[in-house]
Amino acid sequence: MKLHELSDNPGATKRKKRVGRGPGSGMGKTGGRGIKGQKSRSGVAIAGYEGGQMPLYQRLPKRGFNKPNRKSYAVVNLGLIQKFVDAGKLDAKAAIDEDMLVTSGLVRRKLDGIRVLAKGDITAKVALNVTGASKSAIEAVEKAGGTLTVTTAE
């Protein structure tokens, strides 16, 4: 077999439809857009418009309240912290704060702070200093012989 003999399976590739390339193409002149009207013009997006019928997003009931200034926390599980300690990306002997979690690559960005949750188990004796933690996460860290300090960042 030579390079020039290679070809894709039949039907694996489909040629792009070239719109507005003359009457022989079957998609010439108006290019499948019909004649006149908003949809025949360029730069028009009618997303969510249902032809005068009340759109779905307006028909559905609205519930609850979204607090505009709510805090968003980056979440870390104890199992991941243990994994990073085992891999040597985090030093268990030193106090681990939020900046160390970011530099190690465990958390992408701090957002309004980092919150530790108890998913997974931790065996390393670590001293964590974070913005938030679940009660079960605090218990798990203390059970392993470490400390978890929660600081409220205002």
Image (tube, rainbow, N blue to C red):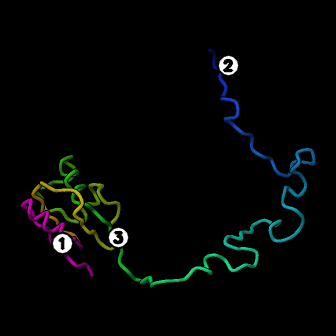
- Is residue 67 magenta-colored? no
Q: Where is residue 39, by image quadrant? A: bottom right
Q: Which residue is mark 3?
A: 111
Q: Where is residue 43, by image quadrant? A: bottom right
Q: Which residue is mark 1?
A: 135
For the residues labelled 2 and 1, the Cα–Cα distance comes to 66 Å
The kind of residue tagged 3 is: Leu
The residue lying furthest to the left in this view is 145
The 10 Å Cα crowd at callout 2, few under 14, some 14 to 19, many 20 or more, is few
Q: Horizontal placement of 112 versus 89: left or right?
A: right
Q: Which residues are magenta?
A: 132-154
For the residues labelled 3 and 1, the Cα–Cα distance comes to 21 Å
Q: Horizontal placement of 85 versus 8: left or right?
A: left
Q: Secondary structure at mark 2?
A: helix
In the image shown, does 98 or 119 lie closer to the viewer?
119
Which residue is painted at 25% across and 78% down in the image? Answer: 153
